[in-house]
Amino acid sequence: MLRAARALLAMRHPLDAELSFSELLGSWWGARLPGVDVERLLGEGLITHATASGRPAGLGILAAITALGTSSSQRDLAEQGMIALRERGLQAPAWADQLGAVTPVAAYVHGDLFGDTDDVVCVFSRDAPDHSGALPPEHALILVLDHNSGGLLRDAWVTTKVDLLLEQCRERARADDFVRFEQWELSEARSVLVRALDRTERVATGVESDPSTGPTVEPVGISSADLTGGSLAAHFALASARVKRLPSPPEGVPDTVPVWRRDRRAVLAARFLASEQAAELSDSYAASRCADHIIAHGCDVDSGRPLRVSPRKVESFLLHWLPGRVVLLPEEQEAMPHVLAAWVRWAGERSRLPEPAVGATLDAVWEATSAFSRVYRDPARPLGLRHEAVRRLLPDGDFASLARRMFAFPLLASELMTGDPEEFDPATSRGRRALLRLDHYGEYEAATPHSGRHHSTGQDHWYRPVNGTDPERERELDRHERLAERLWDGRPANLWAAARRLLDRGVDRPTVLSSLSEVLFESTGESDLRRRLDAL
């Protein structure tokens, strides 16, 4: 890398250097090795090597990482290295002091009325003259935001032909009523892009956010390999640095993504079900469940826009999101296309989508219906699970969580629990405790008189009643309960990934639980926990 950096010393413009170094930093972006922090190993390793080189090329690398580094610790370490090399009398390239020194000029968004993707155009200028004494031309950073994949960035590039780009966008909007091109406030662009950069970074690196901070939606059908290795990876470091130069929203200004709490979603579903468009839906219960899933997809995946409809969105919903994320009962599977079509007509009218666009979206629904019946498979049938067990394991319908929840509470999938009383509800602390006591010690503590119903089934022979309280056993249950709660919620994602790796090696379940519990209680924080889990 130092040899390659020597060629960059002769560059005359800082933008050329920024693009080259961004591509260099993007060469390992998203790379993953078990137990290894690749970004830290290569990024900080490069800084250490560049500092130790004592060469102008090393100083150039340090200047670039100071401006474009992907973490604050990385940038601080590179800055310290620059100071050390300059104290030794090394001269930095002419462009080094201008890296990252830009002023945001304007931001625009270009797309169509369906809103599947947005091309966000951010224009920047430089205040310092170049080597010839003239001010460098403005340049534009273009980021492609894909809303159907959960707000991921799918591409990025830079151009200095800003006037030509903007004029082409305006011309398309003038010639086609279905195309939109509008200017954004710089602070609004920052809010949208910061969220998209963070979302893309987490998917590319495999790091999941804590669900307690908000909904975490894994993009169905998209892997880190789809994001890394191309133009987006080459421009990601530059894009992150440029977005940080945009002004923050004024204090008190709400986030651009609306928060859809449960009560607000319920109100929206009720309004739809009471509408003229939903009047012909025969099974009201199935229609209600289907509407809940449609709204959840729009709120959690589509940046809080459940009323947005498009051919691409309904196809992604039916053929990718539902089969990968949601458990549908047979009657719900049958009703879903009809409910979705009614939703398209209702939401299209409310969002003032042109009639031809609504018609095209309805065509996409019916074209995808036959494929949906082939793609969607009832998860309970191949797994041999009762629908009652599936509903207990997946009260939120999140199919992606089925395996880890069965691992945390295997008794819920057992025939032994047929007709089990309500205190075995894993969504409550008391229910989790009762299930774990049965699982680990074969004991059941009758909590209320109605538990006699459970005894009347003739199943009281497979467990024994609790005989007194053992403090050591209670402490052990406390540990298992905390672990089970994390497995149920899937936080962090590294927890279930570590469990799968151990199971794949043939480690039995009790040993896996013991290993996970030990790591959980020895960790000093979430980052330390993720690091220890990745090392298992």
Image: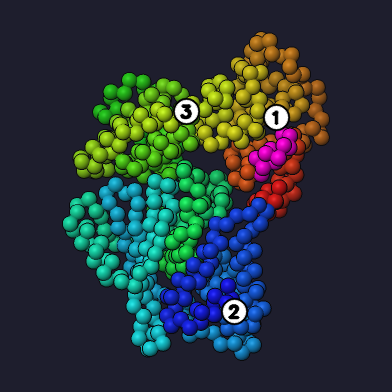
Residue that label 3 marks: 377
Q: Residue 78: which numbered mark, if any?
A: none
User: What segment is highlighted magenta in the picture?
Assistant: 498-509
Residue that label 1 marks: 436
Residue that label 2 marks: 58
Q: Callout 1: few (<14), some (14-19), or many (20+) C-alpha neighbours within 10 Å?
A: many
Under mark 2, the amino acid is: Gly
Q: Callout 2: few (<14), some (14-19), or many (20+) C-alpha neighbours within 10 Å?
A: many
Q: CA distance from mark 3 to mark 2?
A: 56 Å
User: Relative to 193, is 463 above or below?
Assistant: above
User: Residue 147 placed where, x, y %?
Assistant: 39, 49
Side of 277 relative to 380 (left or right): left
Is 501 part of what is drawn in magenta? yes
CB-based contact (under 8 Å), mark 3 and mark 1: no
User: Residue 205 placed where, x, y %?
Assistant: 55, 54
User: Residue 372 placed where, x, y %?
Assistant: 39, 31
Q: Nearer the viewer, residue 159 or 301?
A: 159
Under mark 3, the amino acid is: Arg
Side of 465 relative to 414 (left or right): right
User: Relative to 338, is 138 above or below?
Assistant: below
Residue drawn at point x = 57 percent, y = 57 percent: 31
- Circle 1 sits in a helix, a strand or a loop, which is it? helix
Q: CA distance from mark 3 to mark 1?
A: 30 Å
Say if residue 454 shows up in the picture.
yes
Q: Nearer the viewer, mark 1 or mark 2?
A: 2
Q: Give the quadrant of residue 401.
A: top right
